Image (cartoon, coloured by chain):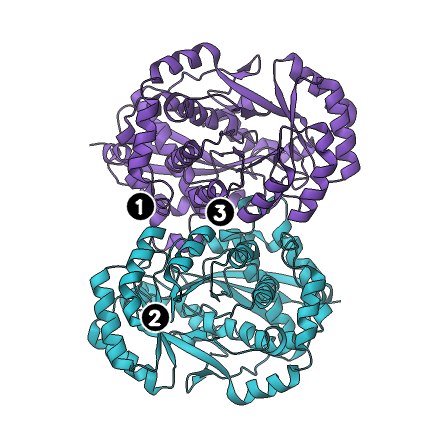
Chain colours: A purple, B cyan
Amino acid sequence: MARFVAMRPRDIRFPTSRSLDGSDAMNPEPDYSAAYVVVATDADDGLEGHAFVFTTGRGNDIEVAAIRALEPWLLGREVEEVLGDLGSFARELTGDPQLRWLGPEKGVIHMACGAVINALWDLRAKREGKPLWKLLSDLTPEELVGLVDFTYLTDVLSPAEATALLRQAEPGRAEREALLRRDGYPAYTTTPGWLGYDDEKLARLAAEAVHDGYRLIKLKVGAALEDDVRRLSVARAAVGSEIEIAVDANQRWDVPDAITWLGKLAEFRPYWIEEPTSTDDVLGHARVREAVAPLRVATGEHVHNRVMFKQLLQAGAVDVVQIDACRVGGVGENIAILLLAAKFGVPVCPHAGGVGLCELVRHLSMFDYVAVSGSQDGRFIEYVDHLHEHFVDPAVVEAGRYVVPTMPGFSGEMLAASLDEHEYPGGPAWRT
Amino acid sequence: MARFVAMRPRDIRFPTSRSLDGSDAMNPEPDYSAAYVVVATDADDGLEGHAFVFTTGRGNDIEVAAIRALEPWLLGREVEEVLGDLGSFARELTGDPQLRWLGPEKGVIHMACGAVINALWDLRAKREGKPLWKLLSDLTPEELVGLVDFTYLTDVLSPAEATALLRQAEPGRAEREALLRRDGYPAYTTTPGWLGYDDEKLARLAAEAVHDGYRLIKLKVGAALEDDVRRLSVARAAVGSEIEIAVDANQRWDVPDAITWLGKLAEFRPYWIEEPTSTDDVLGHARVREAVAPLRVATGEHVHNRVMFKQLLQAGAVDVVQIDACRVGGVGENIAILLLAAKFGVPVCPHAGGVGLCELVRHLSMFDYVAVSGSQDGRFIEYVDHLHEHFVDPAVVEAGRYVVPTMPGFSGEMLAASLDEHEYPGGPAWRT
C-alpha cells in the first residue's frame, strides 16, 4: 500500500522586473514567482505530483510557509485513498477548523491548499496516464459532482442541478473531444499590452499578434487616461477594425472613476473591461456593468473563492468569468466555478500568463468545453509568451489557438534545471 | 533622529483546546494563539509597540512568517515620520504591488499588515502618554479622515462626507468622554455559551452572567437543531425574560438551511443571529435577513476588509456590524468601517474573546462613542472571561460594562513571562 512520504515546497522566482514584462497599473515591477510544491510517494512508479502558487515576488516565502504547514495532512496517508476521493481530501484541507481562521477560504492559506490539491491532481493524472483535461472529461457527472464542495452554493446550485447540467453535456463529449484535438482552443494574447512598453513596441507586437492568428488582444489601462487613449489608438491602427481589443484596469479605479474613464474609452469599442475596480466589490462591478453596457465586464483572477463567483453571477455583475488555476482551492473549486458559469450561461475566459498559468488553465477550459459548457463561443484562454521554456509540458499556441496537451498530468512541472537556477535567494539567477 | 531598529515576531499559543473553552460549530478545538510582534526603535524613551494577529492555533507560524516579511518596510525608517502619518504608512504596506497579490487586502497578508500597523499605533499612543481611544478621540475630523484609505469606498463614502460625519459628532465629545470615564461601555458575554459546555454548566454560567450585570449573553448554535432548542430553553430559564440572548452560528449554514433553522429558533426571540452563513456571502446575508426579520443579522469577525463591510451595508444585509481588531488592516481600516456604519446608522458591536481581542477592541468602540457614532444605543462589546491575566493592561468589566482603560497604548502587550511560557513549540506550556 503506497503512502505519501514527502512534500517539498520550494521558493522559485524569475527576475522579470528587470524587463518590465508583466507591468500594469497595479503591478509596476513584478518578479513572476512560484511557491512550488512536489508531493512524493513510496510507490514503485516513482511518479511525483507537481504544482505551485503563482505570486509576483515578495511574499513567495509566505506562500511556501503556508504550503509547508499543510504537510501533516498528507504525510503517511494512503495514496489510493487520497487520490481516489480528492473531493473529500480538498474539503478536509480547506475545512480544517484551525487553519480556516486564516482565510476562511481566501488568500495565502487558500492558495496553498489549492497548490497541494493541484499537485495531487497532477499525480493522479500521471498515474492514469492522461492529461488532466482528459481525465476530468472521462469522469461521470456523478464523479464530477463529488469533487465539488457545495457548501454556501446550494441557494444557487444544488448537486442535483449540477448533475443535470453535466448530463445534458454528456452526449456531445466524444465529438467535442475530437474537434478539440483537431482544432485546439481559442487563445487571446496580452503580450503586446503591458504598460511598461512604448508605443513602437506596442504597435509592433500588436501587428505580430494579428499575423500570428489572434482575434483578440488585451491592453493594460488605468494609469493615465491620455496614455490609454493614445495606446488604444496605436493598437487599433496596428490591428485594424476586425480584431477585438480587451482592456484591463487591474482594479485601479473606484466605481465612479471606472464609469467616467470607460466613457472616454468607449469610442475604441473594447471587447471587455477587466477588473474595473476591487474584485471584492460585487455590487460595484454590477453598477459599473450597468453603466458601461454594452461593454462587457470581466473579472476573476483575484476572486478568492466560489462564494464570490456565485455572487458576481447572481448580481449580474459580470459578462466574462476569469478563472485562475492558482487563486482558488484547486481543481475541485474551479469545477464548481465552471458549473456556476454554465448555469448562468456566462463564458469562462481564464486568466493566464505569469509563470505556468497558461500551462495549467488550458486543462480546465478544455474540460469545460468537452464536458460542462460544451461551447467555445466567446471563450478564449489568455496567452502570454513568457517563461514557457521552463516547463516540461509547455503551453503551445498555433495560429491563435491553444494546442491540446497530451502528456499525462496537469502540466505544472518545471524543468529541474530551471528550478535550481531560479531558487530564491540562493540560485544562480539571483546571485548576479 | 530615532529610527526603527527591530521587528520581533513570536509564535505564542495557549493550549485552550484542552478545556473546550471557545468551542463552536466551526471551531471544535481551538488553541487560542497570537502571531505576536514587537517593534523597537533606538529612541531614548525605550518604548516598544506591541500587537498581534489572533489565530486559533495551527497556521500561527504562517502569520508569523507574514509579519516577518514586512520587516523591510519599517527597519531604518524615521520614527516620527512614520508615526506622524500612519495613514500613508498603512496604504504603503497594504498597497505594496508584490505582496498585494497574496490578498489583495485579505487573509494572512492583510492580517499581518494589520498587526504591524496596530503595533505602531501602540507605540504612538505610549509616546503620547494616552490610551489609544483617547488619542483617537483627540484628533480633528481632518486628521481622522487622513488615516482612512478611501480606495474603493468613494461610491458610498467620500472623504468630505466622512469629515462632515465627524464634525457633526464634535460638539458632544467632551461630555461623552466624561460619561464614558464614569460609566464605561456596555459589554455582553459569550462565556456561558460555548458548544462544548453541558447544560448544567451553561445554566450556571448564564445565571452568573445576569448576576454580574450583563443584559445580553450569547450562545453558540448550529451543530444540531435539537441541541440548540434545548440549550436555548435552558439559557432562557436561567436568565429570565428580561435578558437578551444572541445566537451565533459561526457560518455553519447555507442560506436555505439558515432560514429553516432560524425559523425553529424564533420562539426564543434571539437578539441577533451572528454569522448565519459564509461571511463572504453579502447577498446571502441579505436574503437571510429579509427572511428572518425582525431577527437582527450580525456579522464581521471574518469580514476581511472595508470593501466587504461597504457592501454588507449597501445591500442591507446586516443590522449589527461586528468589527474585529485583528482581521482587517489595523486601526485606520477599522476607522473606515466605523465611518461606514455611522453613515448607514448601523450599530457596531465588536467581536472579542480569543486572546487579547477584548483588550484591543474596547479602544475602538470607545473612540466610536466619543467621536464617531456618538451613541451606545444597541451597542455592546463582546466579553469572554479568558486569558486576560496574560496582559499588561487587561480588559476589565464591572457590572456588565467595560471600564475605560487609562494606561497609555493599545493594550496588546502581553506579560514577558506569559510570552516565554507560551512560545510555540519550545515554551513550558507546550513541553508537557
Q: Callout 2: few (<14), some (14-19), or many (20+) C-alpha neighbours within 10 Å? A: many
Q: Are marks 2 and 1 on the same chain?
A: no
Q: Residue furthest top?
A: A182
Specify the amino acid type for callout 1: Glu
Query: Is label 3 in a helix, a strand or a loop?
Result: helix
Chain under disc 2:
B
Labelled disc at residue A92? 1
Taking the spot 66% from the left edge, 55% from the top edge, the residue there is: B154
Quadrant housing residue A232: top right
Q: Which residue is mark 3?
A: A107
Task: State how far apart marks 3 and 2 are (Cα).
Answer: 33 Å
Query: Residue A103's spot in the image, x, y percent?
Result: 44, 51
Task: State how far apart marks 2 and 1 are (Cα).
Answer: 32 Å
Q: Nearer the viewer, residue B382 or B40?
A: B382
B228 up-or-down from A197: above or below? below
Quadrant housing residue B211: bottom left
Task: State how far apart marks 1 and 3 are (Cα).
Answer: 18 Å
Taking the image as shown, residue B88 lies to the left or right of residue A365, namely: right
A287 up-or-down from B14: above or below? above
Q: Are marks 1 and 3 on the same chain?
A: yes
Q: Which residue is mark 2?
A: B270
The N terminus of chain A - image quarter: top left
Specify the amino acid type for callout 3: Gly
